[in-house]
Image (cartoon, rainbow, N blue to C red):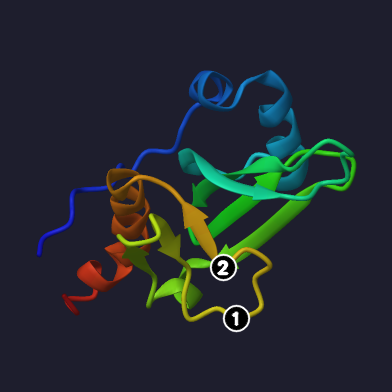
């Protein structure tokens, strides 16, 4: 199966603000500095970030060589996973989750999202395999 092409151009500052909003963009920039972001996706996965009344959504950002997962809060959740460690990731249609594999150390091991959203992320993760002629 041929995966859809992934944009090779990073999001500019205006696109980051549009997709993330002002507060989340500032938070991401405090974590990443000026690192290039190629894709941003709000997931349905929730994590505890220190609020009494509930959890916050996890956001996924695709960087050049990493997947950044984050949720803002009193105790923010931030995790950077090298794309090279996600080579067995798959979408589980039964649970509606993108399962991040084979990484076992991640606090979040699956992201709730639609099949098309997961395909966008998987296409980016697997782009290295396609460039190496492994697909």
- Which residue matches tag 2? 109
- Looking at the image, the residue that sits furthest to the left is 1
- Which residue matches tag 1? 104
Q: Quick one: quadrant of the N terminus?
A: bottom left
Element assignment for label 2: loop
Q: Quick one: quadrant of the C terminus?
A: bottom left
Residue located at (31% from left, 68% from top): 128
Element assignment for label 1: loop
Is residue 38 left or right of 81 when viewed as pictured?
left
Question: Residue 116 or 55: which is nearer the viewer?
Answer: 55
Task: Provide residue 52's location: percent of width, then percent of height.
Answer: 89, 39
Marks 2,1: beta carbons within 8 A: yes
Is residue 6 left or right of 71 when viewed as pictured?
left
Is residue 43 left or right of 47 when viewed as pictured?
left
Residue 134 vertical placement versus 12 (above, below): below
Other residues around mark 1 within 10 Å, as few (<14) / some (14–19) / many (≥20): few
Other residues around mark 2 within 10 Å, as few (<14) / some (14–19) / many (≥20): some
Question: Residue 73 or 38: which is nearer the viewer?
Answer: 73
Residue located at (42% from left, 58% from top): 97
Residue located at (88% from left, 48% from top): 75
Nearer the N terminus, badge 2 or badge 1?
A: 1
Alpha carbon distance from label 2 to label 1? 7 Å
Task: Provide residue 24's location: percent of width, then percent of height.
Answer: 69, 30
Task: Provide residue 27's location: percent of width, then percent of height.
Answer: 75, 35
């Amino acid at each position: 199966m041929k995966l859809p092409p992934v944009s090779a151009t990073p999001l500019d500052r205006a696109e980051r603000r549009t997709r993330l909003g002002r507060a989340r963009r500032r938070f991401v920039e405090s974590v990443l500095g000026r690192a290039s972001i190629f894709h941003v996706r709000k997931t349905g996965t929730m994590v505890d970030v220190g609020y009494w009344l509930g959890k916050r959504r996890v956001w996924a950002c695709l960087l050049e060589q990493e997947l950044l997962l984050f949720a803002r809060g009193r105790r923010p959740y931030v995790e950077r996973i090298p794309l090279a460690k996600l080579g067995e990731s798959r979408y589980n249609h039964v649970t509606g989750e993108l399962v991040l594999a084979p990484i076992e150390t991640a606090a979040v091991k699956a992201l709730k999202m639609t099949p098309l959203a997961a395909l966008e992320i998987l296409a980016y993760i697997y782009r290295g395999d396609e460039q190496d002629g492994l697909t």
